[in-house]
Amino acid sequence: MLSDIFSLAADQLQPLLESNPQLQKALGEPLQQLKALGDKHGPEAQKLYQDLARDLSKLTSKGLNSNTLADASSMVQQRLQQAQQLAQNAGSDAWQRAQAEAGPVSRRF
């Protein structure tokens, strides 16, 4: 179910990017990074991508100009940083859980 929603967000962005080459050029790589983080790190990171798709659609519905591109780029960078932080926290949490579970066993060696 969640992956279907995530696919819909990706599908929503694709026509927007195709119809606005300037937007595609400015946001293409960071959007791909954000989507990859969403694919890899689950629902919270996917929600960031979905929210971004909605926000970019609203922003560009008013027209595309240098201010819009700057705002869109800022939005993407902010969401990318949030997703990277989620990924880092997830890795740290997993490491701490593994250490806690292995703690008694690892002390024997």
Image: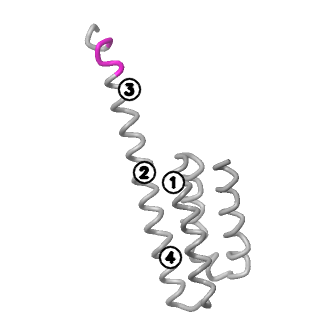
Residue 86 numbered tag = 2
Check contact, mark 1 vs mark 2: CB within 8 A.
yes
Separation of residues labelled 1 and 4 (CA atoms)? 18 Å
Residue on which disc 4 sits = 73
Looking at the rendering, the stretch of residues picked out in magenta corresponds to 101-105
Badge 2 amino acid: Leu
- Disc 1: CA contacts within 10 A as few (<14), some (14-19) or many (>=20): many
Mark 4 and mark 3 lie on one chain; the one further toward the N terminus is 4
Check contact, mark 4 vs mark 2: CB within 8 A.
no
Q: Looking at the rendering, which quadrant does residue 21 occupy?
A: bottom right
Indicate left or right for 63 with 97 as reference: right
Task: Kindly identify the residue that appears in the image at 65 percent across and 63 percent down.
Answer: 9
Which quadrant is home to the C terminus?
Answer: top left
Mark 2 and mark 3 lie on one chain; the one further toward the N terminus is 2
Separation of residues labelled 2 and 3 (CA atoms)? 18 Å
Mark 1 and mark 2 lie on one chain; the one further toward the N terminus is 1
Q: How far across and how far down the image is residue 12, in percent?
A: 69, 68
Task: Kindly identify the residue that appears in the image at 59 percent across and 80 percent down.
Answer: 58
Q: Looking at the rendering, which quadrant does residue 13 occupy?
A: bottom right
Separation of residues labelled 4 and 3 (CA atoms)? 37 Å
Task: Kindly identify the residue that appears in the image at 47 percent across and 62 percent down.
Answer: 80
Q: Is residue 106 above or below residue 70?
A: above
Residue on which disc 3 sits = 98
In the image shown, does 58 or 104 lie closer to the viewer? 58
Badge 4 amino acid: Ser
Q: Is residue 103 magenta?
A: yes
Q: How far across and how far down the image is residue 105, in percent?
A: 32, 11
In the image shown, does 29 or 56 lie closer to the viewer? 56
Separation of residues labelled 1 and 2 (CA atoms)? 7 Å
Residue on which disc 1 sits = 45
Check contact, mark 1 vs mark 4: CB within 8 A.
no
